Image (spheres, rainbow, N blue to C red):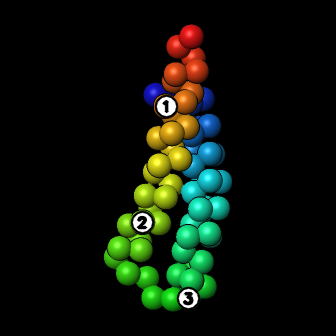
Amino acid sequence: MAPATVRMALRVSLSVGTLLNLINHFDVLLGASLTTTAGLQMALTYVVPYCVSTHGQVWGRRG
């Protein structure tokens, strides 16, 4: 939970998550109806890069 790790993971999550949402949910972002499932998928698209970035930073600092 080091502040630098959290900041970096948030930046990665925002950039990668936004790019993935543009690729995977372009129709919804252009005005198609947003379903609960699509909304959940879009939210999780930000969570996954955050977790991967945090995991990578922690493992990278261990050695």
Q: Nearer the viewer, mark 3 or mark 2?
A: 2
Q: Residues within 10 Å of mark 2 (few under 14, many from 20)?
A: some
Look at the numbered discs 3 and 2 and tell me whether their residues touch, using CB distance below 8 Å: no
The answer to whether residue 20 is above or below residue 36 is above
Label 1 SS: helix
The single residue placed furthest to the left in the displayed view is 36
Q: Residues within 10 Å of mark 1 (few under 14, many from 20)?
A: few
Q: CA distance from mark 1 to mark 3?
A: 35 Å
Please give the residue where the numbered disc 2 appears in the rendered image: 41
Q: CA distance from mark 3 to mark 2?
A: 16 Å
The answer to whether residue 10 is above or below residue 33 is above
Label 3 SS: loop
Which tag, 3 or 2, sits closer to the chain's start?
Answer: 3
Please give the residue where the numbered disc 1 appears in the rendered image: 55
Where, quadrant-wise, is the C terminus in this rendering? top right
Q: Specify the amino acid type for callout 3.
A: Gly
Please give the residue where the numbered disc 3 appears in the rendered image: 31
Residue 53 place in picture, x, y as percent: 55, 37
**Quarter of the image where one finds residue 57:** top right
Q: Specify the amino acid type for callout 1.
A: His
**Quarter of the image where one finds residue 24:** bottom right
